[in-house]
């Protein structure tokens, strides 16, 4: 569903002509690549960077275990801090270490499965984009998936990554059993019946309790979904949001700042034959919104008129495909992100305040605000612990200044009772986090039992857990 850049050009031609030179200079500045760290440090250690480029490190040792015994060896002998890494898709400083960087890429694929129960045991290093077709070949699929398919299963579960759906919980709610390699107690099997406290504390564990090597997942039979994407006025979508999320298996929407419009995305189970959506146009939409920011950002009313003119008459897009192909997406344009999970009743007031604030102070923002709904679960460090939640995710283009997320966005999300996504930008420490989680003290006690010397804690995690 692309905004027609030709239509935007025609509408903007006369207005932009007088400011063309200045706008081109501004666009050149906005498109400059952010400075990159050196590929090696003074000790000739190689650079590691996360997906968006804002986190980096020069680990003394890079370990790539091929089995669980090698994970245990790295935990015992590798220089600390020992930090596991999957796809590096977290925006927070969970991974950076000058000690041991432990890649789980060698622990990938399906270990075994059960046709009767629709369960499968999967190595933690498996990428979500690879797991979808592998499960489909067994007649299974995950009940829900996050927006992006690049993460590793272990990284996604450890940070409470989620999709959207009134009755759909985050990925860690699918975990029936897991194996975790720990510094103090070796390799443990954990479930609701075996080592239940460790299971509840470490399922969402940020890689700070141990290195989870494999998961037993409760999946569902393969299913086909009908996906519908439509552009509607934001005020109308906000009014309809409770009904929208109740009517559909999965529902979310993307509020587009400076346009007054939103894109709703719904999924429902269907028996209709597959109607593949073709090449995703999401990247084209983002580039159109960026173009509109670059050329009309100097005049907010003009920007809104141009956007609404371009979106007028856009027909909904519909497709039918296997669930794993539709629920999770390719995201080729990099960004930095802050996401908080709020009580559902606070979600729409917070969104309205965010839009008002961004449109008042940050005309450089063009990424949509992603709005989702998540069911509660019982993991002790889950942001959805015992609370039906609504999430709000604010993005900044990777070339743009993202400090406004802390200065403008985070105070609003905190004021409305939000808990931060563990893998996305936030400024909180143990002092602010502990009151948000009823089982925080118990979880920290389990963490110290499994890693009494703090070998898994980098400086960021020490601040997060108050272990300084």
Image: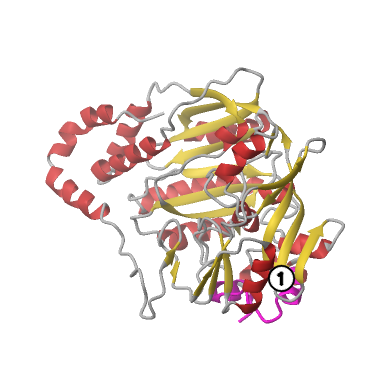
In this view, 276 is above or below 263: above
Residue 29 shown left or right of residue 430 in the figure: left
In front of the other: 326 or 228? 326
Residue hosting label 1: 182
Residue 62 shown left or right of residue 12 in the figure: right
Q: Which residue is depicted at the point 67% across and 82% down?
A: 453
- How many discs appear? 1
In this view, 363 is above or below 194: above
In front of the other: 356 or 400? 400
Question: Does residue 45 show up magenta in the picture?
Answer: no
Whether residue 11 is visible to the viewer of this picture, yes or no, is yes
In this view, 397 is above or below 466: above
In front of the other: 200 or 261? 200
Q: Which residue is depicted at the point 41% across and 23% down?
A: 314
Image quarter (top left, top right, bottom left or bottom right) of the N terminus: top left
Q: Position of residue 369 (x, y in %)?
A: 48, 45
Q: Position of residue 315 (x, y in %)?
A: 44, 21
In this view, 308 is above or below 407: above
Binning the other alpha carbons within 10 Å of mark 1 as few (below 14), some (14 to 19) or many (20 upward) gives many
Q: Quadrant of residue 443?
A: bottom right
In front of the other: 442 or 278? 278
Question: Does residue 446 show up magenta in the picture?
Answer: yes
Q: Position of residue 29 (x, y in %)?
A: 22, 55
Where does the magenta region start and end? 443-468
Residue farthest toward the top in the current orientation of the protein: 272
- Asked which secondary structure carries label 1, the reply is strand
Image quarter (top left, top right, bottom left or bottom right) of the C terminus: bottom right
């Amino acid at each position: 569903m692309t905004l027609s850049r030709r239509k935007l050009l025609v509408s903007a031609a006369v207005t932009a002509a007088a400011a063309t030179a200045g706008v081109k200079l501004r666009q050149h500045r906005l498109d400059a690549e952010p400075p990159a760290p050196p590929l090696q440090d003074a000790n000739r250690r190689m650079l590691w960077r996360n997906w968006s480029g804002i986190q980096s490190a020069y680990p003394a040792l890079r370990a790539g275990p091929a089995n669980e015994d090698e994970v245990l060896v790295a935990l015992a002998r590798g220089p600390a801090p020992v930090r596991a890494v999957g796809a590096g898709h977290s925006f927070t400083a969970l991974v950076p270490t000058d000690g041991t960087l432990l890649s789980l890429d060698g622990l990938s694929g399906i270990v075994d499965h059960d046709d009767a129960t629709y369960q499968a045991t999967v190595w933690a290093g498996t990428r979500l984009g690879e797991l979808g077709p592998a499960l489909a070949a067994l007649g299974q699929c995950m009940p829900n998936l996050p927006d992006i398919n690049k993460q590793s299963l272990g990284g996604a579960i450890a940070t409470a990554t989620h999709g959207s759906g009134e009755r759909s919980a985050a990925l860690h709610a699918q975990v029936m059993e897991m194996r975790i390699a720990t510094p103090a107690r070796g390799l443990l099997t954990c479930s609701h019946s075996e080592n239940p406290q460790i299971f509840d504390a470490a399922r969402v564990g940020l890689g700070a309790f141990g290195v989870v090597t494999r998961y037993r997942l409760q999946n569902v039979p393969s299913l086909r979904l009908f996906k519908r994407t439509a552009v509607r006025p934001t005020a109308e979508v906000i009014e309809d949001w409770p009904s929208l999320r109740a009517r559909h298996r999965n529902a979310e929407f993307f509020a587009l700042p400076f346009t007054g419009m939103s894109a709703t995305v719904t999924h429902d189970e269907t028996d209709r034959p597959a109607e593949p959506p073709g090449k995703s146009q999401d990247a084209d939409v983002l580039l159109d919104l960026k173009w509109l920011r670059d050329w009309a950002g100097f005049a907010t009313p003009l920007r809104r008129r141009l956007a609404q003119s371009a979106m007028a008459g856009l027909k909904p897009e519909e497709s039918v495909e296997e669930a794993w192909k539709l629920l999770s997406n390719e995201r080729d344009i990099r960004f930095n992100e802050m996401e908080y999970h709020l009580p559902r009743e606070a979600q729409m007031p917070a969104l309205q305040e965010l839009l008002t604030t961004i449109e008042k102070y940050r005309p450089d923002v063009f990424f949509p605000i992603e709005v989702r709904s998540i069911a509660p679960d019982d993991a002790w460090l889950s942001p959805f612990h015992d609370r039906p939640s609504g999430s709000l995710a604010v993005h900044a283009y990777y070339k743009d200044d993202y400090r406004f997320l802390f200065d403008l966005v985070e105070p609003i999300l905190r004021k409305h009772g939000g808990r931060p996504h563990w893998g996305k930008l936030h400024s909180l420490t143990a002092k602010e986090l502990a009151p948000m989680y009823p089982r925080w003290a118990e979880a920290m006690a389990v963490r110290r039992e499994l890693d009494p010397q703090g070998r898994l804690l980098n400086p960021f995690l020490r601040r997060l857990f108050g272990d300084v």
